Image (cartoon, rainbow, N blue to C red):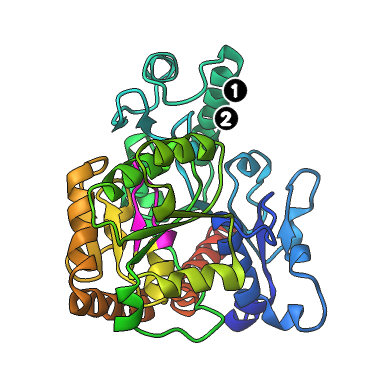
Amino acid sequence: MNHTTVAHKMIYHCSGANIRGGGGLETYIASLVNSQNYELINTGIPPEQLVISSLKNVEQSQFQFLHIHDPDMLVDFREECPAVFTIHNHSSYCPSGTKYLADRQQKCDRSMHPLGCTWGHLIDGCGSRRPQNILKSWQNAAHFLKDVKKLNITVIANSNYVREEIIFNGLSPDKVITLLCAVERPKHPVSSLNQEIHSQQRILFVGRIVPYKGVEWLIQALAKTDQKIHLDIAGDGWGQPKMKELAEKMGLSDRITWHGWCNGEKLEALYQQCFTVVFPSLWPEPAGLVTLEAYAHYRPIIASAIGGIPEYVQDGKTGILVAHNHVYQLADAITELATNYHKSRLMGEQAHAWFEQEFTIDIHMQRLSEIYTRTITNFKDQKQEF
């Protein structure tokens, strides 16, 4: 079969995500659908029809290829066609889905175990303390590990950190490969940081406003920087009222603008008006899409050295890595770029060059297509053996 036909017309993605929703996973799957199936979409077929929300009672042999994104969908996968599964988050091997012990403010290094994970929920605050929620989340992760170990399916991790975690929890190294994420290029023209924008002294946070995303840490660090530096926050979440209260208490209300959830032109404008993007996660992020969005807009990143994030940052070249939840280190990194226009511009240009070299959707699709091709070949070979 012609590989171009497979790549462009016959790839179905399996996920319950709303690809018009605009979130991280939704945006990624939408990018794959649009890139792989553009010929079908151009004939008027809505992209949503190329996403399968359930594999139950579906004749899977009719598909040339399936790319599965949701762990719970593996329960109904019957190996009737070639397929790959991408791990996007920690929920495949961590019942709470965080790998973060909130009450200790440190990442979790335990392997999945009923006693350790129950202790984590009840004592370390890594997830819900409700018994029914603990049991359900444990069952979901345990069922996934059981299913993926027995299935003959290639598993794609979005960072080496995630790959090591799933292997640590019992999956054979031969079954797991790493493919770093990618994002689409901005829809509007972008340019290098200029002196006028740098002089406006604006930094940007993009993401959910929940404790483990590090907004509190960022606000505390902002208080230790020059009063001219202004923080734009693009996002919302249940932690926002408390963070607004903290900002007011620290006398920072006039230095922070809360934009709410942003996408499209509004978000692109915010990227273009800052001199750096700050990614202050406390939990071990599986990957780092925000870093790539910053790079796509010629902006350097200041990010936590935790989880999969360091794989997306060339420290000192495309951004600055800091120890997570270290207020003075974060404040110093912000000040370093705020007071050095040439360094900020150079880092942003190096970041953009790396983005074009490694992280565009086109390059990602080339690498993904190679994985698809190998998977299809292996599937056919195994069928012939039987």
Q: Based on the picture, tell me whether residue 288 belongs to the magenta stretch.
A: yes
39 over 282 or under it: above or below: below
Could one spot residue 370 in this view of the protein? yes
Relative height, residue 124 to residue 181 (above, below): above
Residue 354 position (above or below residue 286):
below
- Residue under numbered circle 1: 136
Residue 45 picture location, percent across and down? 81, 74
Q: Check disc 2: other Cα within 10 Å, few if <14, some if 14-19, many if 20+.
A: some
* In-front residue for pair 302/139: 302
Numbered range of the magenta stretch: 277-290
Q: x and y percent of residue 72 in the render? A: 62, 39
- 239 relative to 223 in the view: left or right: right
Judging depth in this view, the residue of 348 and 38 nearest the camera is 348
Instruction: Tell me the residue that label 2 is attached to.
Output: 140
How would you rate the neighbour count of disc 1 (Cα within 10 Å): few for under 14, some for 14-19, many for 20 or more? Answer: few
**Amino acid type of the residue that numbered disc 1 sits on in the rendered structure:** Lys
User: Decide: marks 1, 2 in contact (CB < 8 A)?
Assistant: yes
Q: Is residue 166 above or below residue 83?
A: above
